[in-house]
Image (cartoon, rainbow, N blue to C red):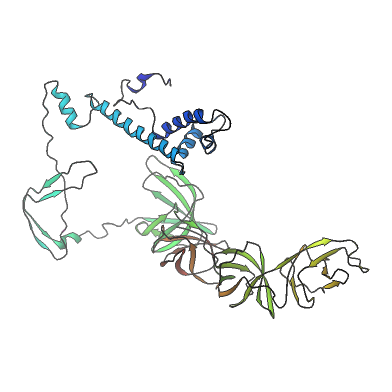
Amino acid sequence: MNKKDLTRWNRSGLKAFRYIDGNAITYLETLRLALNEEYNANSPPQWQELVSRFPQLANESPLQKNKRITDQYYDERRDFAWEILRSFARSVHVLGEYINAYANEAYLPTAIEWDNVRKLVALLGYQPSPPSSAMTSIALLLKPGQSGEINRGFAIKNKPAKGAATIIFETQEKMKGHALINTMRLKDWNRNPQTIKTQKQGRFRNIVFELPQLAKDINIGDQGVLVAAKKGYPIEVISMKHKKHNSRITLRARSKMPKKIALADTTLYLQPQFIEKPLPNGKGSASLSAAVNLADGEVVISGKSSSLAALKVVQAKQKLVLFEPSTFNENDSITRALISKKQHLDDFPKIDSPANDFFILNDVANKDKVFVVDEKLNPVSKKIEKEDSTNTFYIEGKNLGDTLYYTQKPLTSKPLATVINVGNATVTSLQFSGKASELTSGQWLWVKHKNGKRAAYQISKIKQQQDQFHLTLPSTKAVALIQS
């Protein structure tokens, strides 16, 4: 379309004039381009963020440009000059829309405000009649225990939308009322008698679910919860068919469910607003006396000096850690393990030895009191030797992998923390970081267990603390991910 063709807004068939060609987002981009030429034409650039924060792509498509300038408008930055530009673009947008509205109100076919229409037709010598009275049906609900007569002319007014005038209605005749009438209903007046059949498909069951409208933002593979008769079933969307005004989606249930379910007792939950991994829980989890900076896969030593065990960190967050294996107890100390990598050394040690691969053990004072494990965290039975000329402790590296973890006994370094509580295999409470702003008691959760199985649970209770919150659930196994 030719941008200079000014008739494109006012051609025949249009219901209104449109004089404004842009909005705050496009105005801001126009200002950015102009200021870029002003400040960044010479070297070095004086306002680099004009081109670097949201760079213009080569051969940029209309869709890419629209996304770029939209993100640019809604971007948060502490640049006073940029905020002034954005406020100015917004002001121009608002002012332009007012100008556009005034232009339409000055022409009879496009005017919509009653006062403007009345003034325009008055120029033709016509005086319109006031609008006729409106009629509507209104239900009057009496408070519990009340009864009596409602007189003729009883006035009721609506709650108008912002900027609209209030409409007042009056009853045309005297009526009798009683609070018991509020609760009178036909039996099952609000229950759909239809049932949904579930079809067995291998180990699973498929359910065809009719939506009253076209499906939006629902995709094949989406996970959710189907609640029937107050029991939840984890489901997955496997197919969709769209009609003119509604959609039919096929769900696959990953747990046992009845052959028929009542439609009136069935609710489908999709499009989760809360997706989060809980803090470490279940078997192998531990609550420590202090928050420790531990990396996933790191090896630590637990226990007391007389009885030590090597643990691998699976997950660590705040004071909760998931270890593998779960060979630790309450009050055990947690210490970082020393690491030794296999080295290929010639002429070491200074004795006749056919071996060339060794593990050098640093920070060892007594070779007879060292706890050593291999990469699989199995204790190493090979004897620790000492190279007298260099006072170096070592282990021959044959059949021991590439890495050893060790510590001196008794523990010489200060423990990182102490185990306060040991997690159970049965989980009744999950902990999360942050605030539970999107969750409430009674909501349903789609749950993925650490063993890969799916389940659906209802939140019994939420307890908010300063920097984390707890969800109380029915007794279950360790949880890896939830959606709600």
Per the picture, the main secondary structure of the magenta-coloured stretch is loop
Q: Report if residue 422 lies within the magenta region.
A: no
Identity of the residue furthest to the right in this view: 352
The spot of residue 435 in percent (x, y) is 44, 60
Write the start and end of the magenta stretch as one range.
135-144
- Image position of 422 with respect to 270: above or below: below
Residue 416 horizontal side relative to residue 138, left or right: right
Q: Report the front residue among 428 and 223.
A: 428
Q: Residue at x 18, y 59 (%)?
A: 182
- For the residue pair 236 and 469, the one nearer the viewer reads as 469
**Residue 127, percent across and down?**
10, 26
Residue appearing at x 52%, y 37% in the figure = 49
**Residue at the far bottom in the pictured view:** 306
Residue at the (46%, 66%) spot, across then down: 470
- Residue 266 falls in which quadrant of the image? bottom left
Residue 379: horizontal and vertical position, in percent? 74, 73
Image: 367 above or below 83: below
Say whether residue 331 is left or right of residue 403. left
Nearer to us in this view, 413 or 272: 413
Say which quarter of the image contains residue 330. Answer: bottom right
Quadrant where the C terminus lies?
bottom left
Residue 203: % across, % down: 54, 59
Q: Is residue 316 left or right of residue 91?
A: right
Is residue 392 or residue 238 the one in the foreground? 392
- Quadrant for residue 70, please give it: top left
